[in-house]
Image: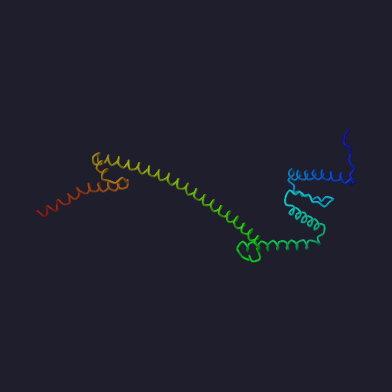
Amino acid sequence: MGRGKIVIRRIDNITSRQVTFSKRRKGLLKKARELAILCDAEVSLIIFSSTGKLYDFSSTSLRSVIERYEKAKEEHHQLMNPVSEVKFWQREVATLRQQLHNLQENYRRLMGEELAGLSVKDLQNLESQLEISLHAVRMKKDQFLTNEIQDLSRKGNIIHQENMELYKKVNLIHQENMELYKKAYGTREANGANRNLPPHEFSIGENSNVTIQLQLSQPQQQNNETPKEASKLG
């Protein structure tokens, strides 16, 4: 035997009425919660019992849902009655002015102005807000400095690697210069020059040029001095 259809009417028995209210209230709240989760809907439910007890559920802030409902209802009435559009925009302007006034007042309080009318609790709340804001600013600053240090460290490693490559190239050029010097002047002179010259490759190139110029210039000086001495003797 299946369950019979229940007649929808007021239950006269107070006990049965209270039991039915409790069961149906729980089921209704459960269905509202499931609807909000499954369908991503914004759901709010308000229930007053026969004794005046309040039961409510809201997937978001109940106040925001009520404000959204009133706004949507006003917009619907505006579509139906264009005459009320002026009143609607007047209320919107008044709301925005009030919000702007509140923001300006909070800003002045955060800047340490107009604190005379605040109570101790208000001052404590303001202090907590400032501490939270200061903590967030310090965390942002530390993160920025950490990223900058890491960036500079990466650049330093790249420069170090480039310096090592240049150092290897300098040593290779130094060895090539020594090989050329040995081929040009022999092993003994190269060894002597290698002991006397500094290890920098540019010093080797400059001193080798000076030596070459001296060797090439000495025969010319001897040839030039011979006719002068002969002329004096003559």
Residue drawn at x 87%, y 46% is 14
Name which residue lies at 89% across and 41% down: 6
Residue drawn 83% across and 50% down? 49
> Which residue is depicted at the point 84% across and 51% down?
51
Q: In this view, does 148 lie to the left or right of 106?
A: left
Closer-to-camera residue (218/26): 26
Instruction: Name which quarter of the figure residue 97 lies in.
Output: bottom right
Q: Which of 98 and 76 is in front in this view?
A: 98
Quadrant for the N terminus, please.
top right
- Classify residue 123 as left or right of residue 59: left
Q: How far from the left and from the top, in percent, is residue 99?
A: 69, 61
**On the rendered image, what quadrant is the C terminus found in?**
bottom left
Q: Which of 195 and 104 is in front in this view?
A: 104
Position of 13 with respect to 225 (left or right) is: right
Q: Where is residue 5 in the image (x, y as percent from the top left)?
A: 89, 39
Location of residue 129 in the rendering, given as x and y in whole percent from the top left corner = 62, 57
* Residue furthest front in the image: 15
Looking at the picture, tell me which residue is in the foreground, 34 or 46.
46
Q: Where is residue 70 in the image (x, y as percent from the top left)?
A: 78, 56
Left or right of 160 on screen, residue 220: left
Q: Residue furthest left?
A: 234
For the image, the number of numbered tags is: 0
